[in-house]
Image (tube, grey):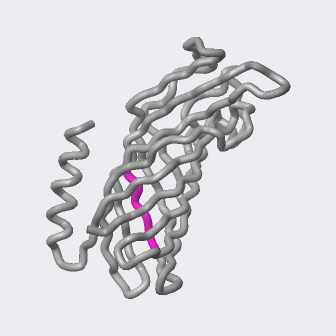
Amino acid sequence: MKYIYFSFFIFLTLQISAQDFHGGILGGLSTSEISGDRLQGPNKAGMYLGGFVNRHFSPRSSVQMELDFIQKGSRKNPDSTSYDTYLLRLNYVEMPIHYNYDFHERASLETGLSLGVLVYSHEEANGYEWVSGGEFNNLDLSFNIGLFYSIFERLRINVRYSNSILAVRPHSSGQTYKWNQGQYNEVLSFVLFYEL
């Protein structure tokens, strides 16, 4: 994984020096859930770190590519009705590619796809390692939509919703129905983007 990040930042450095390309670093928080696990969320917090490069091809339109490390998963904490706990950690290295539209001098909309590679998974119930379903897929293809707002000239905040297009693993029962083919990642993230 460190070689992927090293290669990306060398590419980022080269692209920043090219005319019309801009890039930088990003960091923030992801809140996630697994749809299909019957737990209401998002209730699992995680890190969201990476780098980005973008290029405008018209005054209001640009394309942005990122290489990110993101923590997804699901969590259930004990409450007044149950002492049961559940924790699912899924760590991905993701590459989003987005179209951005600047609808205001300080704000823009984004939409696009991201391809994630699963680098770590851990599942436990009541403090013990446990697997509730089949193996997780190594790849996660997601649809993303979000909003940027410029705080300062080089600093923007991003709120992004992401949902898997393909199931990340089958339901524990193995059943499928039409578009419901298993469990899916759902993520709401809050990330700061700093342009170098």
Magenta range: 95-100
Q: What percent of the width, then of the height, locates residue 116?
A: 42, 43
Residue 168 lies, in percent from the top left, at: 54, 34
Tell me if 75 is positioned left or right of 19 in this view.
Answer: right
- Residue nearest the viewer, comparing 68 with 85: 85
Q: Quadrant of the N terminus?
A: top left
In the current view of this chain or complex, which residue is farthest to the top?
Answer: 128
User: Is residue 98 shown in magenta?
Assistant: yes
Front-lying residue, 52 or 76: 76
Residue depicted at x 45% and y 72% = 100
Q: Position of residue 56 (x, y in %)?
A: 33, 78
What is the x, y in percent for residue 4? 24, 43
81 vs 142: above or below: above
Residue 128, placed above or below residue 43: above
Q: Residue shown at 51%/78% (left/top)?
A: 107
The residue furthest front is 80
> Which residue is painted at 52% across and 39% down in the image?
72
Q: Quadrant of the C terminus?
A: bottom left
In the rendered structure, the answer to whether residue 38 lies left or right of residue 86 reads right
Camera-side residue of 90 and 49: 49
The picture quadrant where one finds residue 55 is bottom left
> Is 88 in the magenta?
no
